[in-house]
Image (cartoon, rainbow, N blue to C red):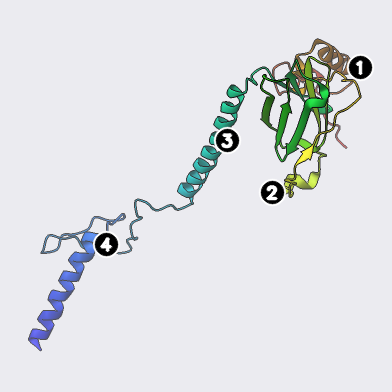
Amino acid sequence: MFKLLLFLTLLTIVACCHHGRSHKCRHEKPSKCRHGGKLGCKGGRQPERPDYDKYGENQNKELIDDLSRDLKQIDDHLRKLCNENENSETREMFGIQSYNIFVPLTGVKADNIVVKSRYRYVYIIARRNPPAKPYTEIRRLSKLVDVSRGYWMYDGQELIIRFKYVNSDPEELFNCGTDYNNSLVTIPKSDVDYVLDLDVRYALQNSNVQKIIRDHFENSTSPRPIPESNQLDAADHNEPEVF
């Protein structure tokens, strides 16, 4: 019986020291055991692993890194194509009514121009008389652009491509987006003359637009925005009525 009790006592001490070496106490100072180990403290929590991802932050960071890397590869490829095909003079404009692309293009006939689009991309090819190489260009489009509603026109100096915007749907603001059409669309040529549109990115820099805005607020009781600020002018701010 004595040997059995001694064996159980030694077994308890060994287990205690082993637990103390593998368990770091956060709440109270552990005591030393006779073999130089550390006893676990009462109520101590199991330590978190160094690689423990409590809120999935590491996984989210890896996902963002992967997506960013994929998009960068696409941008790098498009930039390479742009330089190889000398497309650097092409301009784009986000007009109020439509998205516009302006391509300086000479020495071709309208019958030799082909414009096609697929989801988020537009492809341009204009055949020239040999030995001149055909003009080619690939551009990525915004998600705001409806590639199925576009047309182009050519005046002998410049190719103009216009796309309508996607109709806004309030329901799309609360979900992950709708299914897209990945079919190849041939953009038709338009006989309608180009109507000058206003680029919404620079609209507020236009003097005529500024005059319209000033006239609006001078004839209105609406609060007037402070220039270069998102705040409202306190002098024009009407206090709400108390009912």
Indicate the quadrant containing the N terminus: top left, top right, bottom left or bottom right.
bottom left
Who comes first in sequence, dot 2 or dot 1?
Answer: 2
Who comes first in sequence, dot 4 or dot 1?
Answer: 4
**For this view, does 234 lie left or right of residue 76?**
right
Q: Give the distance between the C-alpha atoms of the residues marked 3 and 4, in whole angstroms.
A: 56 Å
Q: Amino acid at mark 3?
A: Ile
Query: What element does badge 3 sit on?
Result: helix
Residue linked to disc 2: 176
At 85% from the left edge and 29% from the top edge, which residue is drawn? 189
Residue 162: which disc? none
Using the rendered image of the protein, determine whether residue 238 is visible from the camera's viewpoint.
no
Residue linked to disc 4: 41
Indicate the quadrant containing the C terminus: top left, top right, bottom left or bottom right.
top right
Using the rendered image of the protein, determine whether residue 167 is visible from the camera's viewpoint.
yes
Q: Which tag is nearer the camera, tag 2 or tag 1? A: 2
Residue linked to disc 1: 219
Q: Which tag is nearer the camera, tag 3 or tag 1? A: 3
At 51% from the left edge and 43% from the top edge, which residue is drawn? 66
Residue 41, position as x, y percentages in the image: 27, 62
Q: Which tag is nearer the camera, tag 4 or tag 2? A: 2
Is label 4 in contact with label 1 (beta carbons under 8 Å)? no
Residue 74: which disc? 3
Q: Give the distance between the C-alpha atoms of the residues marked 3 and 2, in whole angstroms.
A: 22 Å
